[in-house]
Structures are given as C-alpha cells and as structure tokens.
Image (spheres, grey):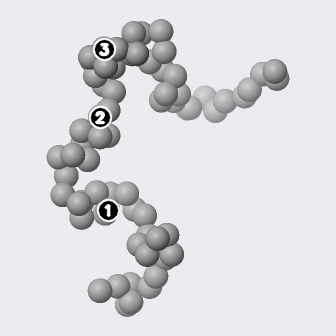
Amino acid sequence: MADLVSHPDEVKVVSRRFGQGAANIDRYLELDGYQAVQKALAMEPDAIINESRLPGCAGAAEPDSLRG
C-alpha cells in the first residue's frame, strides 16, 4: 500500500488511543473517551442544534425569513 501523506496539524482521533488499553470501557473513559457524548447529554436540545451549525429541514438551507 502506498504511504499516506497527512497534514502536520492532523489529529487521529480514533487511532490516538490504540495501544493504550482503550478496548476496556473504563480505560477509554480515563483517556477522555466519549467527551462529546457527555457534553451533549448535559445540553438542552436547542443548544445542541445551535452548536452543530447544521441547517434545518433535513439539510436544506432556508432563508432566515422563512424560519418559524
């Protein structure tokens, strides 16, 4: 397989815990796993939507004048 080139600022989120015992859920949590899930569970639904910056209507962006 060809060598893959990565950006110098790239953070390998999934693989950075490999070899550290992260297959064990308690160890994964010690390594700060599931931070985004924990943050989302502590938020109100509207706050999650606002932070996600995703457009409404199943991805179809609509002008602000049409929003309810």
Looking at numbered disc 3 in the image, what kind of residue is underneath it? Arg
Residue topped by disc 2: 35
Residue at image point 56% right, 32% down: 10
Circle 3 SS class: helix
Disc number lying in front (3 or 2): 3
Seen as rendered, the residue at the extreme bottom is 65
Q: Is residue 19 above or below residue 33?
A: above
Looking at numbered disc 2 in the image, what kind of residue is underneath it? Gln
Q: Is residue 67 left or right of residue 55?
A: left
* Image x and y of residue 15, in percent: 52, 22
Disc number lying in front (3 or 1): 3
Residue topped by disc 1: 49
Between discs 3 and 1, the one toward the N terminus:
3
Looking at numbered disc 1 in the image, what kind of residue is underneath it? Ile
Residue 46 visible in the shown view: yes
Between discs 2 and 1, the one toward the N terminus:
2
Residue 31 visible in the shown view: no
* Image x and y of residue 50, in percent: 31, 63
Inter-mark Cα distance, 3 to 1: 30 Å
Circle 2 SS class: helix
Inter-mark Cα distance, 2 to 1: 17 Å
Seen as rendered, the residue at the extreme front is 24
